[in-house]
Image: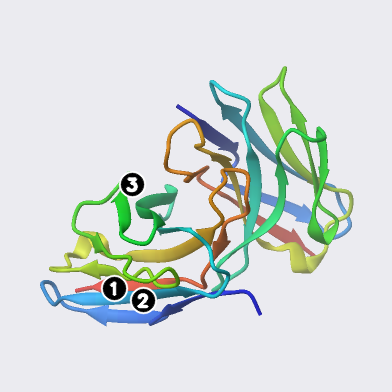
Amino acid sequence: EAQVTQNPRYLITVTGKKLTVTCSQNMNHEYMSWYRQDPGLGLRQIYYSMNVEVTDKGDVPEGYKVSRKEKRNFPLILESPSPNQTSLYFCASSGGQALETQYFGPGTRLLVL
Amino acid sequence: AQSVTQLGSHVSVSEGALVLLRCNYSSSVPPYLFWYVQYPNQGLQLLLKYTSAATLVKGINGFEAEFKKSETSFHLTKPSAHMSDAAEYFCAVSDYGGATNKLIFGTGTLLAVQP
């Protein structure tokens, strides 16, 4: 089954404690990205990757890091989480063309105390 | 730069009534437009997309949307609402004018269906 998986689904942590949210897709997609969803703001892109070893900032990259060492994986790293990073995070993947459907993971709900 | 505006953060309809969720876009190039649905505690699922092939686009679960260039709109409709349609709906435009291939989302419309 074609899918995007994320782990963990729920996470409570404290300010400053490094964490990683994993994302994996099994569709051999070149393009992957991370979004955060906040009430009243919709989804905003954090980082994206056009292919292995190619990543770039989206609209709200501050406080986040990513890496793309393998085509299927695109982890999101919060080196020093802060309460304003409390949010719902989604990973997405698609083929390389703009008209292609983006497939979303189930989301990771993060609470930073 | 592309953008979308969804009118109405909350819409409530009765079961069996028409569903109309509004989306207006702004784009300097012919847009690619999408509607996604998010059920509680789930990720986003594609309902339908417009890629310039036909102005009336049919999607899953009986939804459809019509692209109207003159009105810069891409409203989502369903003739008869079902309880299972209760969810949050997002309109999005593809930012293919840039190099990012990202989706630019509206702020979402939460649809409630009353029995």
Instruction: Work out which residue is located at the far top of the displayed protein and give it.
Output: B70
Where residue A58 is drawn, which disc sits there?
Answer: 3
**Marks 1 and 3 close (CB-CB < 8 Å):** no
Q: Nearer the viewer, residue A98 or B65?
A: A98
Evaluate whether label 1 is on the same chain as label 3. yes
> Where residue A111 is drawn, which disc sits there?
1
| In the rendered image, residues at marks 3 and 2 fall on the same chain | yes
Q: Residue at x 57, y 56 (%)?
A: A102
Quadrant assignment, res B51: top right
Considering depth in this image, is B17 or B49 the residue closer to the camera? Answer: B49
Whether the residues at callouts 3 and 2 have beta carbons within 8 Å, the answer is no
Specify whether disc 2 shares its chain with disc 1.
yes
On residue B109, which mark appears?
Answer: none
Q: Residue at x 15, y 69 (%)?
A: A79
Is tag 1's residue or tag 3's residue first in the polypeptide sequence? 3
- Asked if residue B66 is positioned above or below residue A2 in the image, the reply reads above
Residue A3 in picture, x, y percent from top left: 58, 74
What residue would you read off at disc 2?
Answer: A22
Residue A51, given in percent of the width and then of the height, sits at: 41, 57
Residue B113, located in which quarter of the rendered image? bottom right
On the image, the x and y values in percent for residue B74 come to: 70, 35
- Around disc 2, counting alpha carbons within 10 Å, would you say few (fewer than 14), some (14 to 19), or many (20 or more)? some
First reached walking from the N terminus: tag 3 or tag 2:
2
Q: Secondary structure at mark 3?
A: loop
